[in-house]
């Protein structure tokens, strides 16, 4: 008997709703904790960036938009567990758009690093742009086909697992390939390359574990799959923000060490990466 059948009893339904609410609150607590832990470096490295800074606004989006969504979830959870078909469809559209936006934001950060490692090759840039655009289009098509198939009752769930793991694999493959080339060129152990490899691998591992949990919930037809969306919001926020913070910290430290304060005046992470590589090569 599947969890979908079991959950129809009042006691099982009450337990599922209670678990969902607990996970919703726990994911918010985790996100708030991460914000507090990194708040000092955020103020030091992110806030001083100019208003035209792309990565500054991307950081604020990942951090505070996701925080706003998580706070809103605490209020909306009552409706999400009501079992109304119209509410479930609206929730599915919302969760698809918001989760895709978070994934895409992280992919843009990773893509910028790949672009920098390949010396701003426009062929690589076009490849990455097609990759990310294709992912967004696939998600939109998948959502359009899935929405009419939404169940008419039961707890609202996220029915389909994300397919972004393929993109992370390709992006990581680009980075690893460039790392091998870098080692042969003699600058594979420089801070910038090691940081990019470490951060990208960490994000990949986190996302593949998260995707594994989502796949497991979907395979088991677990009506509590919605809890993975709450954790996705918090984990993607923490991962994306730390990617940006780490690069900003390295740029500042390297700039001070080499006595070139103007070297990193541009905010674009691509420029920071390329210039740092040129300096340490």
Image (cartoon, grey):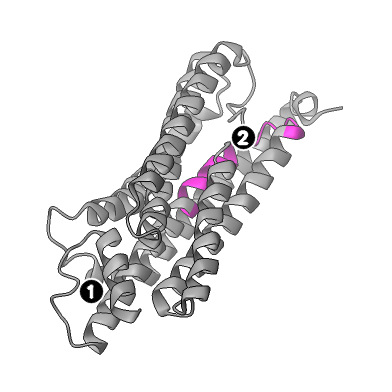
**Image: magenta residue range:** 219-235
Q: Is residue 120 left or right of residue 11?
A: left
Sooner in the amino-acid sequence: mark 2 or mark 1: 1
Residue 165 part of the magenta-drawn span? no
Q: x, y (%) of residue 133? A: 41, 33
Q: Provide residue 203's location: percent of width, then percent of height.
A: 52, 58
| 196 vs 161, nearest the viewer | 196
CA distance separating discs 2 and 1: 37 Å
The residue shown at (52%, 74%) is 184
**Main secondary structure along the magenta-highlighted residues:** helix
| Image position, residue 47 (x, y; %) | 19, 65
- Characterize the local packing of mark 1: few (<14), some (14-19) or many (20 or more) Cα atoms within 10 angstroms: few
Q: Is residue 219 visible?
A: yes
Residue in view at x 63 percent, y 16 percent: 153
In front here: 195 or 71?
195
Q: Residue at x 56, y 29 (%)?
A: 81
Q: Which residue is mark 1?
A: 44
Residue for badge 2: 161
Q: Secondary structure at mark 1?
A: helix
């Amino acid at each position: 008997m599947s969890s979908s059948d079991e959950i129809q009893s009042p006691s099982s339904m009450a337990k599922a709703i209670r678990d969902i609410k607990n996970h919703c609150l726990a994911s918010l607590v985790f996100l708030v904790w991460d914000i507090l832990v990194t708040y000092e470096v955020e103020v030091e490295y992110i806030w001083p960036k100019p208003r035209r800074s792309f990565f500054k606004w991307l950081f604020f989006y990942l951090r505070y938009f996701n925080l706003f969504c998580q706070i809103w979830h605490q209020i909306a959870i009552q409706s999400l567990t009501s079992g109304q078909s119209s509410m479930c469809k609206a929730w599915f559209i919302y969760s698809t758009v918001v989760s895709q936006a978070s994934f895409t934001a992280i992919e843009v950060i990773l893509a910028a690093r790949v672009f920098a490692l390949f010396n701003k090759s426009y062929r690589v840039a076009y490849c990455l742009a097609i990759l990310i655009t294709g992912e967004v289009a696939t998600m939109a098509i998948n959502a359009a086909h899935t929405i009419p198939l939404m169940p008419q009752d039961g707890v609202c769930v996220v029915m389909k697992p994300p397919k972004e793991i393929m993109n992370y694999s390709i992006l990581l493959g680009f980075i690893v390939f460039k790392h091998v080339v870098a080692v042969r060129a003699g600058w594979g152990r420089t801070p910038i390359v090691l940081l990019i490899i470490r951060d990208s691998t960490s994000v990949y591992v986190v996302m593949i574990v998260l995707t594994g949990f989502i796949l497991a919930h979907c395979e088991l037809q677990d009506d509590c799959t919605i809890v993975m969306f709450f954790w996705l919001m918090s984990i993607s926020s923490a991962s994306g923000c730390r990617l940006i913070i780490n690069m900003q910290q390295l740029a500042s430290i390297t700039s001070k060490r080499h006595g070139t304060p103007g070297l990193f005046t541009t905010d674009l992470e691509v420029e920071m990466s390329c210039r740092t590589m040129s300096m340490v090569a």
